[in-house]
Amino acid sequence: MLKVQDLSLNLNGKPILRNINLSIHRGEIHSILGANGTGKTSLAYVLMGLYRPTSGRIIFEGEDITKLSVHERAKRGITLAWQEPARFEGLTVGEYLHLSRERGGGSLSPERCLEMVGLTPSLYLGRPVDQTLSGGERKRIELASVLAMEPKLAILDEPDSGIDAPSLDQVANVIRTLAKGGSSVLLITHHEQIAEIADRASSLCGGIILKTASPEEVVRFFRNHCRECLHVNRPEEELVRNF
Amino acid sequence: MSETFDRSREFEAIVEAYERGGGDPSVLLDRRFASFVVSGNRILSSNSVPGVVLEGQETETGVRAYVKVEPGTKVPFPVHLCFGMLPREGLQEITSEFEIGEGANVKFLAHCSFPNAANVRHIMDSRVHVGHDAEMEYSETHFHGRRGGTEVVPRTEVQVEAGGRFRNQFKLITGRVGKLNIELNSELKEGAVCDLEVKVYGRGDDEIRVRESVYLNGTGSRGLVRSRIVVTEEAQSEVLGEIVGNAPFTRGHVDCVEIVQGERAKAKALPLLQVLDPTAKLTHEAAIGSVDKRQVQTLMARGLSEEEAVEVIVRGLLK
């Protein structure tokens, strides 16, 4: 479904992503693990069209979408849930979900989407998507809006951050539901527990993918090399060579 | 005042304009609702209800109105006010006095309609007195045609007694105004609360000027001055929100958002805070410029075009 070929990104003359090669199959959950500042969000932004890559190609369902706008990519079924989603004055949760459903062509009702992320529809549908929502509530609504779209590819940038630990299972279930419904998911996370629900995983450091394997292997790799790393974004040469 | 329309249809026509501006015409004929309908300098209808007195007098250029809510009266339904001018040209001067008695509670829904204006001046001079522990809400919505041929000048002086609450909302988002010059000054006594909100969409070469002041003169009084302005094409806006903390433990906040669409529109925000008592605390926030990029991108990632995304954001802001 998605093929990323030799993708590089420079921002202000600084290399952020370097020769990324990645593929995601239909209905597959692919998690990206990496420490802060290693290029995970930049990768999400390049795939959504918010950043233009310096070189490389993005192929989606056989079409080269490298030069398409955010809106054009969304029309083809790609969407992104931001790590810190925007707030909208005067736009209600119900309107936001309805708009996502209408544009994405999804079949789930806004009520059902809210229930799936653990929010009571009667309490939330009429509330504005503004500063009155807590960070956790806003993240759940972002996830609900992705569900409402029923996208072909959902890019989820740390959907678990700001969510209390007991609710992580709920986030994991939503991601599984997306995949069961046929969506592919690129899941960016810090949580090993969440990363392990993926079918495959990749470890990112210094804008380079160091390892792609089963989530168990990548989590083990992350634990051994990244969790207490004192040289973030300067991966050991041996690891780069091995990949 | 020039006459370019059929006088016999005046009530029907002004009500039609009222409806296009968002008003519910059925309430103007329902005796349970206090209402007052003015076209140009003519009072077309007036209905008082128990505890609410609505009196008016026609003048050469407009109407002098007196509104009194008896002490302790909790008015169950909003009081509907309809002001408008149907001719293309002319002057309408409304002078009004609102006396809200001690412990009373009332909400006014005012609609001002100028559907045909090419050269109309609408001046509204109001004096408001909100009594001890009384509550008054005044919500005014404007409906204008596309010509932008109106000069709207609402000037309001408000006094809120101890424990009283005053909320004012002004909305002009349908049609083009031309020139808008809002001036509101309020003085609050002990524990009183004042909440002011202005929402305006400026188009063409509209000139929008808003100046709202809250003087927190009583201990523990509180004020909020909020504005949401969108200017597009060659429209210009200037918003001054002023709060003066003049007494102990007063609290105030100025919150201004102005969105500028296009290269020729201009916006200016001037929050003005004065603390004259060391225990007073005033804050302000202002966001001025183009539509927030992250908001636009989020909606585009849901499948909206950039233009559609901006429209959703602006509509929400002015809702």
Image (cartoon, coloured by chain):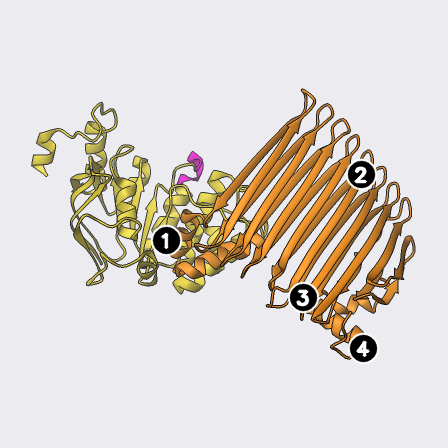
Chain colours: A yellow, B orange
- Residue A164 drawn in magenta: yes
Q: Which span of residues is magenta-colored?
A: A163-168
Q: Is mark 4 on a helix, strand or loop?
A: helix
Q: Nearer the viewer, residue B52 or B87?
A: B87
Closer to viewer: mark 4 or mark 1: 4
- Residue B318 lies, in percent from the top left, at 58, 54
Disc 1 residue crowd, few under 14, some 14–19, many 20+, Cα 10 Å = some
Q: Earlier in the sequence, mark 4 or mark 2?
A: 4
Residue at left 58%, top 58%? Answer: B206
- Residue B143 drawn in magenta: no
Residue topped by disc 4: B7
Disc 3 residue crowd, few under 14, some 14–19, many 20+, Cα 10 Å = some
- Residue B216 lies, in percent from the top left, at 73, 31
Q: Earlier in the sequence, mark 2 or mark 3?
A: 3
Mark 3 residue type: Asn
Q: Nearer the viewer, residue A122 or B187?
A: B187
Same subunit under labels 4 and 1? no
Residue topped by disc 3: B119
Mark 1 residue type: Thr
Closer to viewer: mark 2 or mark 1: 2
Q: Earlier in the sequence, mark 4 or mark 3?
A: 4
